[in-house]
Amino acid sequence: MHYLANPLFGVFLSLVVYEIGEYLFKKTKGFFLTQPLFVAMVLGIIILVIMAKVFNVSTAEMYTKAYKPGGDLIFWFLNPATIAFAVPLYKRNDVFKKNWVIIVCSLLVGTFISLFAITGIAKLIGLSKVGVASMLSQSATTAIALPLSTAVGGNPAVTAMACILNAVIIYALGKPLVKWFRLESDPVGEGLGLGTAGHTVGSAFALKLGSVQGAMAAVSVVLIGVIDNVAVPIFARLLGL
């Protein structure tokens, strides 16, 4: 199995499963369960499990020794990709300057409400301390959520799954939720909602709706990341995690 430790294996596997997801997404005309990120995650796990059985090693070993070297290369690009959200914000910074008090306050309130809600639901379904810690940072985009999850004693793999599921759900239900909360007439609220709940995928969806929505989604991704980096460790300590 040593030849699989080449980083090219992890990169190749990631690209293949994502392209399969893209193909299925187009063929099913945007069916939410075939969202490329979701398909890539599920299919990638299945392939690694099968390969682990073929090589007679544990799935964890197959992941760390075969996939992770290449996966880490891809993960590295998440940071500059996240920073790139400053571009749509820069283009419409006039909207942020006009509404910055409302934007910051709403994101602060939303973050603390989500932390309490996540903790309550996690304890209600009987998650362990590690499980609770893993879920706390899932309101941030993946590049921020994973190291933050590790810092508070969570499992970054669980956090990654939660972040991806958030994105898939928002991609699928974004339009109905916007109508339900009557945000279609408020591009600022529309963008903030999609960016906060759907992270990068939600922001990409918001960009399709308009420049204001895209800029506000970018604001939410950046600010939620900053707020979570401060709030999550404090909240985790208060919970005794």
Image (tube, rainbow, N blue to C red):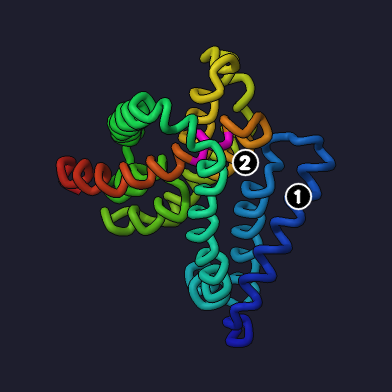
Report the residue marked by disc 2.
204
For the residue marked with disc 2, what is the amino acid? Ala
Outermost residue on the right side: it is 27
- Which residue is at a point 21% across and 41% down the rendered structure image? 235
- Placement of the N terminus among the 4 image quadrants: bottom right
The foreground one among 73 and 164 is 73
Question: Which of the 4 image quadrants contains residue 5?
Answer: bottom right
- Which residue is at a point 70% across and 59% down the rendered structure image? 17
Across and down, in percent, residue 132 comes to: 31, 43
User: Which secondary structure lies at badge 2?
Assistant: helix
Q: Is residue 81 left or right of residue 126?
A: right
Compared to residue 47, the image places residue 148 above or below, namely above
Question: Which of the 4 image quadrants contains residue 138?
Answer: top left
- Which residue is at a point 30% across and 50% down the rendered structure image? 130
Disc number for residue 22: 1
The secondary structure that most of the magenta stretch takes on is helix
Tell me whether circle 1 and circle 2 mark residues in contact (CB < 8 Å).
Answer: no
The foreground one among 218 and 175 is 218
In the image, the segment drawn in magenta is: 214-218
Across and down, in percent, residue 110 comes to: 35, 28
Question: Which of the 4 image quadrants contains residue 116?
Answer: top left
Disc number for residue 131: none
What is the crowding at mark 2: few (fewer than 14 residues within 10 Å), some, or many (at least 20)?
A: some
Examine the rendering and report whether any part of residue 117 can be seen: no
Across and down, in percent, residue 50 comes to: 64, 65
Marks 1 and 2, how far apart at CA: 15 Å
User: Which secondary structure lies at badge 1?
Assistant: helix
Across and down, in percent, residue 74 comes to: 57, 66
Q: How many labels does the image show?
A: 2
